[in-house]
Image (spheres, rainbow, N blue to C red):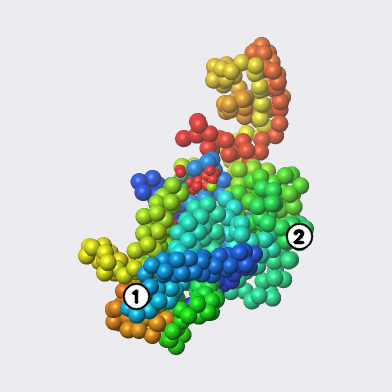
Amino acid sequence: MTTSSLAVMERHLIAYRRLWKSSALSAVLTPVLFMVSIGVGVGGFVDEVDGVPYLAWIAAPLLLSAVFQQTAQESTSRVFHELNTTRTVHAIVATSAGVRDVLVGRLLYLMIRVQFSTVCFLAIAACFGAVRSWWILAEPLVAAAVAIATALPLTALASTITDDTYLPAVSRLITVPVVLFSGILFPPTKLPEWAAAAVYASPLWHGVDLARAAALGQRPDWPLWAHIAVLGVWSAAGYALSSRILHRRVYDGNS
Amino acid sequence: MTGERVISAKGLAKRYDAFEAVKGIDFEVRSGEVFGLLGSNGAGKSSTMRMIGCVSRPTSGELRVLGMDPVKDGSRIRGRIGVCPQFDNLDPDLTVRENLYAYSRFFGIPRAKGRRRADELLEFFEIADKAHGKVAAMSGGMKRRLTIARALINNPEIVLLDEPTTGLDPQARHLVWERLHQLKRQGITLILTTHYMDEAEQLCDRLVIMRSGRFVAEGSPASLIRTYTQPEVVELRFASDDLRALAEKVDDLGRVEVLPDRLLIYTDRGNDVAARVRDRALGPSSVLVRRSGLEDAFLALTGRDAR
Ligand SMILES: Nc1ncnc2c1ncn2[C@@H]1O[C@H](COP(=O)(O)OP(=O)(O)OP(=O)(O)O)[C@@H](O)[C@H]1O
Ligand SMILES: [Mg+2]
């Protein structure tokens, strides 16, 4: 991390200052509404999963879903517009800052937003009895890991798009299905085997499993090292790819 | 007036897929110089500027900027130069002043200094009254001034200005020219592209004319005018559209340039030629004799009839 990465983060924070109230409110309120409506409503039919009330079983995973969607938004349409419409990425990389700073600076900014909504949501979820273990303190780390493993691959994808008619497709074919099938409202074991395999590839599911385990004080379905490995692979591959693609786009391959 | 070599290029070329936009150019720029790149649309000026600005990798040839290699030391070079790109890429999510401040941070300039520098530049380009407004609320010419101001935020040693005054009103252009003169007096090297010949004549110590990716002429504005044109021009306008046919009827009087709306005859003796045109009863709607300028040299070098 260099001072230039911090400068890029600062740029995002300056811009965010004007919209943070409405944005932060919806980032916290959306998962809370889901938690209450589905947790109480559907929970009335389901009663318990693995000996845990349904609301508590979905609460921490719902937060991860909100983190995922927030990050996906920032990494797809925002990246697209900064590259193609406003071309502010081109302005940044004409300075001492480079592609790495563009990537890392945005991640740092996302971390701040994600941590803020995580803490607020968990405080509310605790009032609903959805926080049942001190392991919850690990939740911010899980949220950060999911944000990074989501942001970088999606940035790579968004950087290849030059025509905005493809943006809705990214949301419909990637973001929405990932949210629906990542073990948030029901376990992937309820799916056919081939579909479950796809779920296990998604970074969100790994976060969901860890977040649920932390909130409930249970053992995760997969061992910790396996979760870290999958999230790590998405992050590393996402960084390598997005960095390469951006270099080619903004520098014609220059350093 | 001019010091050590700050930019040098040998056989510099840029290819986009199959298309070669810059076809091997050689040049040097010395510190404190104002160096101009002229040429028709698509001649390769911006491509050249982007290579110097270390945001586009040369396909072949050798390029050195401030003694460094743009491919390896891009970030370090970019930290010491300022760039006003042809098309504004200001940040619409930030205010005018924040645009300058945020940019200062990308160069690692401390916060307090960045704010001070932003305010100075807003004054320098007379847009301080817009400081707290949105970029989107500025007129095109004001955005342009903000982009030029932004290029100076890091006190650069070299400033690359790609058509800096396009879209400016006459007062604003004069303001920018005066400011660029001030920079030149401070010893800052300026590289400029423009389609305004008066601008090039006013500002540039030396310029090159590009045509299809190559340099076709190089020298001071005065020497280019001397070398590539006659001292005077007779401009003829006609009611008729068939200027090519009319050109043939006067081509014994001097070199004739056919423009879409008029004929130009280059000569040593403008008044003589004008009189002889009148004798031929071709019925021009107007005849004007004037001294030739950089635009005439430019037309001779880049026009349809140039080799
Ligand atoms: N990124 C690119 N990909 C493909 N072709 C390009 C690219 N950039 C420029 N070109 C082509 O290279 C040629 C030179 O373009 P360049 O922008 O350097 O011209 P210019 O002299 O700056 O023209 P203008 O006066 O219109 O700004 C043009 O034919 C242009 O279409
Ligand atoms: Mg250009």
Q: Which residue is mark 2?
A: B128
Residue A73 visible in the displayed image: yes
| Residue B16 - label | none
In this picture, is B231 found above or below B60? Answer: above
**Where residue B86 appears, x then y in whole percent?**
57, 50
Q: Residue at x 67, y 32 (%)?
A: B232
Instruction: Give the residue drawn at x 59%, y 18%.
Output: B241
Of circles 1 and 2, the one toward us is 1
Please state which of residues B262 and A130 is positioned toward the viewer in this rendering: A130
Q: Chain of mark 1?
A: A
The numbered dot on residue A49 is 1
What amino acid is found at the position of numbered circle 1 in the picture? Val
Tag count in the figure?
2
**Residue drawn at x 40%, y 47% as measured from the top left:** B20
Quadrant where the C terminus of chain A sits is: bottom left
Q: Amino acid at mark 2?
A: Ala
